[in-house]
Image: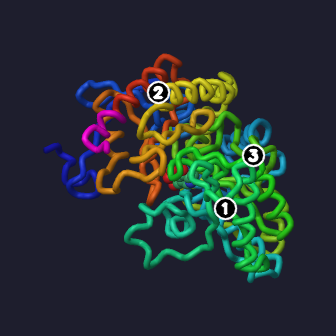
Amino acid sequence: MSATDDLWPFLPGRKSLKIVAAQGATLVTDDGREILDLAGGAIAVNVGHGRAEVARAIAAEAERLTYVVPPWATPSREQLVSRLRQSWLPPSLNRAYFASGGSEANETAMKVAVQHFASRGLPRKSKIIGRELSYHGTTLATTGLGGHAARRIGLEAVLQDHPRAPTPYPLRAPTDWPADQLGRCYADALEAVIDAEGPETVAAVMAEPIVGSSGGALIPPEDYWPRIRALCDRHDILLIFDEVMTGFGRTGRRFACEHWDLAPDLLVAGKGLAGGYAPIGGLFASDAVLEPIAASGGEVMFHTFGAHPAACAAADAVLAILEREELVARSAALGVKLSGWLNDAFADHPHVAESRGCGLLQAIEVVADRETLEPFPQIAGVTRKIVAAGLERGIYAYWGGTGVIRDIVCLGPPFTITEAELQRGVAILRDAVDAALAGLRR
Ligand SMILES: Cc1ncc(COP(=O)(O)O)c(C=O)c1O
């Protein structure tokens, strides 16, 4: 028993790995084993582990300034905001708010959407529509909005109900929808939810433009987001994109919204903003969204540790590396290779329904029956077994999926991972899938 066994992990009886060092895409355990980090932690580490220049930026800022209340300016805040404006954000999103992570930033986006309409004298316009397969965070409000069945267990009594529309899922689309019109069909389904609620009661639609781990890198049909953008404009509904996982190059563009050449009204980011070096989440909005709140004397309350100077310094240093080393382009190019390797490894696998994704956010979906897409029974714990088999063989992949769609393994490595490492990782993943499924196969 180690000295921390009665304190950590939080839930009694659970075991955790102990990592004592990390460099590039490699984690080192306390017993000296190396693990290839195919998930960048929680799909956050984009510039790789062990970047001394980021560590130095954090240390320098911490020496200069301990803490300053979030609404005030500091040099590191100004520097980060100016870099975001100049090189990263859609031009329409010219206001920034920083929280300590994705959940806080998403919850603030929900509040801002509701405050926006209340400030305009439209308090009935207060509903936020989510989607069935989604994850927006761990607070009660974001858990209530999200469609992550496993993370709602035991909380149902206190979660607020939000209307939800189906998440575009081409592999599992209703069979009576024409395959070449899925974008329209899914957009119609969302419109039907808006109509049923009454557009005059809907403040916002909130969604991940490419679904992260809950659905496993689900990319919607090409025309889906343009249709939803137009639908929201038509009904004076704010479109909130949760780009906590997809932001800052993860899908091969700065933000996933660039794949469709459109901008949301509110954009939320986290994870990759500081590449895992510091806790920070961002909410970016347009003047049009915020002016009514300011004009009516409203406030958007800060979190004590929002925009922490050291976290802003970390984010600025990480974004500088992404720019200097052209890592967003690398994420796109390496993503194409990764898709090919996953396809080679799994296209003929009897229990992998498909591999999918883009950039360095990709996933495989494991099923009992490839024809009917029936999953393995929940009790079989297939995803957990695959992740464990991977760890035994020296790779760390991220568990995804939830509810009925439960066996999804996601890959989200640092953008700096070498081709050889990534290719080796895919081969080990194939091995891990086979080992985990041995004995379960029908
Ligand atoms: C899409 C998405 N939104 C929100 C969150 C929550 O972010 P955080 O864990 O930083 O609070 C996550 C975390 O996995 C996420 O993937």
Q: Which mark is residue 122?
A: none
Crowd tier of the residue under label 1, counting other residues whose Cα lies within 10 Å: few below 14, some 14–19, many 20 or above: many
Residue shown at 64%/37% (left/top)?
A: 251
The quarter of the rendered structure image containing the C terminus is top left
Is residue 434 inside the magenta stretch?
Answer: yes
Q: Earlier in the sequence, mark 3 or mark 1?
A: 1
Crowd tier of the residue under label 3, counting other residues whose Cα lies within 10 Å: few below 14, some 14–19, many 20 or above: few
Element at label 3? loop
Residue shown at 70%/36% (left/top)?
A: 253
Residue shown at 78%/70% (left/top)?
A: 293
Q: Which residue is mark 2?
A: 345
The amino acid pointed to by label 1 is: Met
Quarter of image, res 273: top right
Q: Is residue 90 left or right of residue 154?
A: right
Which span of residues is magenta-colored?
433-442
Q: Which mark is residue 222?
A: 3
